[in-house]
Image: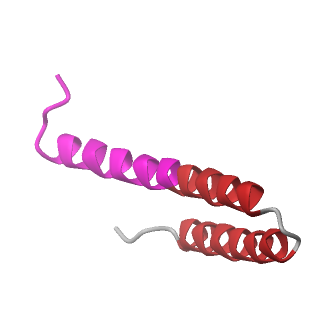
Amino acid sequence: MGIDVDVIFKIAGVGIIVAFLVTILDQAGKKEYSQWVVLIGFIYILFQVATIVNDLFQKIKSVFLFNG
């Protein structure tokens, strides 16, 4: 019933990569690009979480037999 550990590691990995890229881009004076990297990373994580929530709702529907 628990969440897969792989998903947690994916989210953490994306966060680390985004933080690394933002730091490098900020030091290079590319503030606009670093903001885009943050936005793209956020959207990717948002889709990952949306998939998890969708799976949760599908399991809830199957428990209460609302599959019709």
Farthest top residue in view: 68
Residue positioned 29% across, 42% down in the render: 58
The spot of residue 53 in percent (x, y) is 34, 51
What secondary structure is the stretch in magenta mostly built from? helix
The spot of residue 16 in percent (x, y) is 69, 77
Front residue of this view, candidates 41 and 24: 24
Q: Is residue 10 above or below residue 46?
A: below
Any magenta on residue 37? no
Residue positioned 88% across, 71% down in the render: 28
Any magenta on residue 49? yes
Q: Is residue 6 above or below residue 41?
A: below
Which quarter of the rendered picture does the C terminus lie within? top left
The spot of residue 59 in percent (x, y) is 27, 48
As drawn, is 33 to the left or to the right of 6?
right
The spot of residue 15 in percent (x, y) is 63, 72
The quarter holding residue 20 reads bottom right
Which quarter of the rendered picture does the N terminus lie within? bottom left
Front residue of this view, candidates 27 and 40: 27
As drawn, is 3 to the left or to the right of 26?
left
Q: Which residues are magenta?
A: 46-68
Farthest right residue in view: 28
Residue positioned 13% across, 32% down in the render: 66
Front residue of this view, candidates 55 and 37: 37
Residue positioned 84% across, 68% down in the render: 29
Count the marks: 0
Colour scheme in use? secondary structure
